[in-house]
Image (spheres, rainbow, N blue to C red):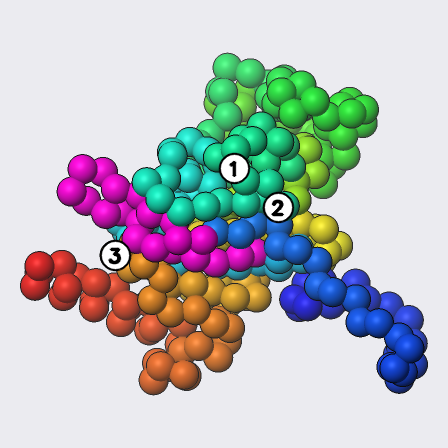
Amino acid sequence: MSKHAAAVVRGPPSPARTDSMTVASPPPPVLSVEGLCKSFGPLRAVDGVSFHVAPGEIVGLVGPNGAGKTTTLNMILGVLGPTAGRIEIEGVNLAADRTRALTKTNFAAVYAPLPGNLTVEENLRVFGMIYAVRDLTRRIDTLLTTYDLARYRKSKAGVLSSGEQTRLSLAKAMLNQPRLLLLDEPTASIDPSTARDIRTVITDMVGGGDCGVLWTSHNMYEVEAVCDRVMFISGGRIVLTGDPKTLPGEHGAASLDDLFVAVAHEAAHQGRAA
């Protein structure tokens, strides 16, 4: 159980198990990736990547620029077709039934702003209709309050500050109450106070135990603060994985930031050698 899912457990300790009691099996992963590959001509951008994300878990995917993070996310979103491998979302094969697999999936990234000529409310309503959100007006009202956007309801998205646009993108991503949330640099280019608030909202949401998050970031402090597991990707391959708080010490690094730098330097060295 992740630290986020564990936070919602309440009540007295369970009685000791007897032979007549059965142990509940863990819930299936919200995301399962097996042997994922993507080639662009002779370039292998993603090379045999495998991992899973469980409900109530935040998993970090980190690595230097060009390592394969965004390509991996785009394949999970169905934007790119993999050269090889398999992606399942809540047990549904993405290649076989894309619509069903993505019904409870959503995405937010600083490089994918919402239409600036629509108001905050119009953006949420349009995307809510695309996702077929029930009781959409109430859902919009809830998200405007949660993400402190109520005062901007009638404002054009294009005139919002970068932090306000980030909050709007996250509100959009929560419209369909996703079981799988993909976040690509969700707090980049916003001030530390707003970033902290956004991290708190996301971790509280994941604490309910229903949603799993795949989170990419270059901010190692953020990764250590929010992620249950972290995966380092370099050259299209997962090269390290583990608890972000203990992984650096396991590899002789003083911090997660130092470990990131070491992985990036090794990738650069291999690139020059090639």
Q: Name the residue under label 1.
A: 94
Apparent side of residue 269 relative to residue 158 in the rendered image (left or right)? left
Q: Mark 3 points at which residue?
A: 235
Asked whether residue 217 appears in the rendered view, the answer is no
Where is residue 48? Give x, y as percent: 34, 55
Where is residue 165? Give x, y as percent: 52, 33
Question: Does the magenta stretch mainly form a helix, a strand or a loop?
Answer: strand
Q: Quadrant of residue 253?
A: bottom left
- In the displayed structure, would residue 12 be above or below residue 115? below
- In the displayed structure, would residue 57 be above or below residue 161? below
Determine the residue positioned at 52% across, 37% down: 94
Specify whether residue 26 is painted magenta. no
Front residue of this view, candidates 19 and 176: 19
Q: How far apart are marks 3 and 1 (CA)?
A: 24 Å
**Which stretch appears magenta?**
34-53
Q: Quadrant of residue 220?
A: bottom left
Q: What element carries label 1?
A: loop
User: Badge 2 local density, few (<14 within 10 Å), some, or many (20+)?
Assistant: few
Q: Distance between the residues labelled 2 and 1?
A: 9 Å
The answer to which of marks 2 and 3 sits earlier in the sequence is 2
Q: What residue type is labelled 2?
A: Gly
Q: Mark 2 points at which residue?
A: 91
User: Badge 1 local density, few (<14 within 10 Å), some, or many (20+)?
Assistant: many
Q: What element carries label 3?
A: loop
Q: What residue type is labelled 3?
A: Gly
